[in-house]
Image: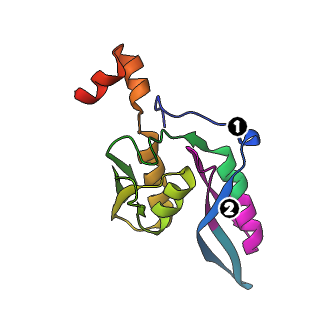
Amino acid sequence: MSNVNVKRVKSSEIEFKDRLVSIQRVTKVTKGGRTFSFSAIVVVGNENGVVGYGLGKAKEVTAAIAKGIDDAKKNLIKVPILKGTIPHDQLGKYSGALVYLKPAAPGTGVIAGGAMRAVLESVGVKDVLAKSKGSSNPHSVVKATINALVKMRDPHTIAQLRGIELSKVFNG
């Protein structure tokens, strides 16, 4: 992700809430029988513009979730949020998953499917319309949603980049 907008955040300063997106039981077949382990994808966020996701794998469910949370805290990004929604429409893509995020009026709520909902609620978006197209694999959907959020740009930075007043950004 070589994007201008990716702002790495230190996890030590912030209090996070974690959400378990999905957990899978994976089987490795050896000559001695089957070996079970668990794979967990977790999203962490401070519900104020910072979000990250992580993958944890272990023999027990709790250990897999703990590893996922630790991994998520290492991959945090900052997302611009305006009045409880996102600044503009955005497409996000990862592998076979394609997600579309659209700003919504106050009071709409988070209209999004499973894996997307976890990411959007963790980042602190209160009103958004979202559609997941293509793959419904939770890993891909989470990464596509993060990809869309990374591409978000807020009007203040655009005004600074272009060297114009904030009012001119909206008028086109």
124 left or right of 134 in image: right
Foreground pick, 108 / 148: 108
Quarter that holds the C terminus: top left
Q: Which residue extends farthest front?
A: 107
Q: Residue at x 39, y 53 (%)?
A: 106
Distance (Cα) linking label 2 and label 1: 20 Å
Q: Residue at x 49, y 65 (%)?
A: 115
Sooner in the amino-acid sequence: mark 2 or mark 1: 1
Q: Residue at x 47, y 42 (%)?
A: 81
- Label 1 residue SS: loop
Foreground pick, 100 / 83: 83
51 left or right of 116 in image: right
Which contiguous range is marked in magenta? 40-68
User: Which residue position holds label 1?
Assistant: 10
- Label 2 residue SS: strand
- x and y, in percent, of residue 5 in the image: 48, 32
Residue type marked 2: Gly
Q: Which residue extends farthest left?
A: 172
User: Which residue position holds label 2?
Assistant: 56
* Mark 1, other Cα within 10 Å: few <14 / some 14–19 / many ≥20: few
Q: Residue at x 36, y 59 (%)?
A: 130
- x and y, in percent, of residue 75 in the image: 62, 45
Foreground pick, 25 / 72: 72
Is 17 one of the magenta-colored residues? Answer: no
Is 61 one of the magenta-colored residues? Answer: yes
- x and y, in percent, of residue 139 in the image: 51, 62
Residue type marked 1: Lys
From this view, report whether residue 25 is shown above or below residue 168: below
